[in-house]
């Protein structure tokens, strides 16, 4: 059977202006929130733009005075487990999952300007009126108590959205109609930056050429952790793979039983390359994630 795929059509519109009100669906148009919309300005909101009598495009609007490095209208993952990929599985299907977003990168917008809107989807007044609609939107922006974070918005509505739909108020409070508006700034919670996906795929291809698919996925999983937690230093993704390879070798040779043993392995590798002090304060959560990957890798090898 032929599988049809469609390229997502990116569109941008400049000079959006916040109107000061909203037209939400009936189940979310709360009277007390209407008053708040008059007083507040949103940092980000959705805006519907009519295509014809039946269909609207939905735009994410950057209502700040800063350019957003990227906007991802999909759900980035922290690691290959969240992407439902499996260590030891060398199938093409699993390899595509390991790549995380090879199929969604056509939806990624970069350099979204102030007051610029980017199309994230569309709704049809007849086909979608009774459907439960959901959109995930991620972007990098400061938080109330942090200079950098990744914001995760989860929009869920029964039926179509019309007019303007605030995602986050200027005081960083969540509009009452939003399911969630999460500020992710702890390393354990932040997904892998979508800006390194292409670089990450290049690293994977290189690892496959050197070590085969199974071992390449294992090393990549370790490198994901090193990158997310900035282990040792804030290195580019493609430059920490050397340490990831050596950590993978030492894990299989030394067979650690707990996170403290994993910590010792990671520190030994970084001390060798960069001297004492690198990876001195490595997060035990990072060690726990790497231990989990090692245990999964050993289990898969034993099953063969």
Image (cartoon, grey):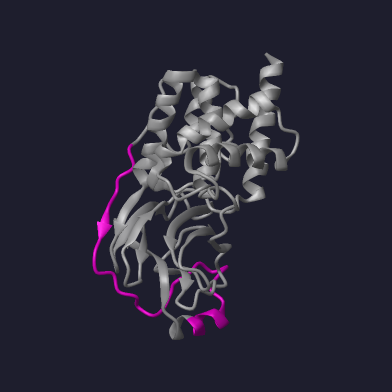
Quadrant in which residue 43 is drawn: bottom left
Q: Is residue 31 magenta?
A: yes
| Main secondary structure type of the part rendered in magenta | loop
- Residue 160 falls left or right of residue 118: right
Counting from the top left corner in percent of width and height, residue 53 is at: 32, 58
Q: Which residue appears farthest toward the right when viewing the image?
A: 257
Give the residue drawn at x 71%, y 43%: 260
Q: Please, which residue is most extreme toward the left here? A: 14
The front one of 60 and 99 is 99
Q: Is residue 258 left or right of residue 122?
A: right
The front one of 95 and 229 is: 229
Where residue 12 appears, x then y in whole percent?
26, 57
* Residue 55 seen anywhere in this rendered image of the structure: no
Q: Quadrant of the C terminus?
A: top right
The quadrant of the rendering that contains the N terminus is top left
**Is residue 15 within the magenta segment?**
yes
Tell me which corner region of the image, top left, top right, bottom left or bottom right, holds residue 101: top left
Give, as a single range, the part of the protein colored magenta.
7-36
> Which residue occupies the foreground of this view, 127 or 64?
64
Q: Is residue 101 above or below residue 132?
A: above
* Residue name at image x 32 percent, y 57 percent: 118
**Above or below: residue 289 compared with residue 1:** below
């Amino acid at each position: 059977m032929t599988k049809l795929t469609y390229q997502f059509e990116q569109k941008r519109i400049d000079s959006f202006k916040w109107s000061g009100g909203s037209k939400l669906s009936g189940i979310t148009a709360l009277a007390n929130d209407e008053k708040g919309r008059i007083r507040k300005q949103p940092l980000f909101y959705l805006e519907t733009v009519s295509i014809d009598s039946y269909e609207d495009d939905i735009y994410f609007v950057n209502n700040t005075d800063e350019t957003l490095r990227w906007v991802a209208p999909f759900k980035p993952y922290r690691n290959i487990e969240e992407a439902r990929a499996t260590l030891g599985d060398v199938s093409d299907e699993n390899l595509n999952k390991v790549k995380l977003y090879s199929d969604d990168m056509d939806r990624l917008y970069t350099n979204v300007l102030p007051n610029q809107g980017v199309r994230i989807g569309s709704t049809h007044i007849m086909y979608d009126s009774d459907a439960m609609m959901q959109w995930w939107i991620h972007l990098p922006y400061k938080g109330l108590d942090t200079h950098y974070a990744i914001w995760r918005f989860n929009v869920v509505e029964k039926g179509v959205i019309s007019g303007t739909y605030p995602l986050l108020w200027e005081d960083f409070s969540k509009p009452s109609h939003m399911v969630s508006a999460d500020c992710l700034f702890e390393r354990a919670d932040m997904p892998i930056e979508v800006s390194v996906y292409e670089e990450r795929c290049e690293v994977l291809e290189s690892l496959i050429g050197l070590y085969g698919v199974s071992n390449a996925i294992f090393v990549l999983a370790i490198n994901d952790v090193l990158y997310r937690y900035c282990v040792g230093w804030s290195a580019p993704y493609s430059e920490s793979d050397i340490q990831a390879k050596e950590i993978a070798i030492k894990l299989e040779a030394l067979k650690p039983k707990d996170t403290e043993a994993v910590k010792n392995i990671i520190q030994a590798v970084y001390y060798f390359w960069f001297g004492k002090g690198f990876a001195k304060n490595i997060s035990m959560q990072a060690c726990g994630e790497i231990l989990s990957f090692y245990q999964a890798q050993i289990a898969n090898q034993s099953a063969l």
